[in-house]
Image (tube, grey):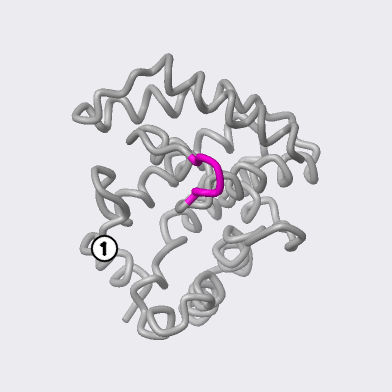
Amino acid sequence: VSSLERCSKLRNVTFAKELGTIYDRVKRIEWLSEVLFKQLNISDLLLDDVRIASSLCKHDLVSQIVSEFPELQGLMGSKYLLEEGKSREVSLSVLEHYLPRGAGDDLPKSTGGSILALSERLELLISIFAKGDRPSGSSDPYALRRAGNGILQIVWEREWKLDILKLLEKGINNWSNKFPKLGINRVRLYNDLSEFFRQRFISL
């Protein structure tokens, strides 16, 4: 089974209620990767690799081995892509976009992996906040705080000048158009996410 065939199977896997499938999620990650790429003003030589990696970043989730051993997600995805002849940069980006997995974990080393890791976490935050869920007390089922910490850690480590608030504004406008049934209050969502990042910043 090829990576493209696995990607197609993601249409049958639900991401979260009201947010479509994991295939839909990947499309949002692709969009964010492109926006991030332009905002960070990175060499266009990397753009094709970032596009390919973002489109294939979750393909291994429907593989039998990851179904049995979820901790191998990303690792198996990168190995499958190398086996198919994809570039080392694309494979490494897919592997690294899960980093950091937790406090004290390694951060992505490659530019592509860093962009994809940021996109994946931003997609998670905007999507889950958009449907009305927030971390509260010890309850954080989607690990949103960890996602926010990861974003800030990667940006600091790479010394990127990234306007996160501007990025949130673009994302919220896009999500509002994609999910009219959610009735997204753009101002409230922007304020909630801004405050969330302020708290993560203070925490770190």
Q: Residue at x 48, y 21 (%)?
A: 190
Q: Is residue 139 inside the magenta stretch?
A: yes
In front here: 200 or 67? 200
> From what the image shows, is residue 31 above or below residue 58?
above
Give coordinates of residue 145: x percent, y percent. 59, 45
Q: Is residue 130 above or below residue 47?
A: above
Q: What segment carries the magenta color?
A: 135-140
| Image location of residue 60, percent across then percent down | 41, 72
Q: Nearer the viewer, residue 76 or 191?
A: 191
Q: Residue at x 42, y 39 (%)?
A: 31
- 90 is within the stretch colored magenta: no
Picture residue at 49% right of the left edge, 48% below the top = 139
Quarter of the image where the C terminus is located: top right
Secondary structure found at label 1: loop
Quarter where residue 55 is shown: bottom left
> Which residue is the site of mark 1?
13
Q: Position of residue 177 (x, y in %)?
A: 28, 25
Please state which of residues 42 and 78 is positioned toward the viewer in this rendering.
78
Residue located 72% across and 40% down the image: 155
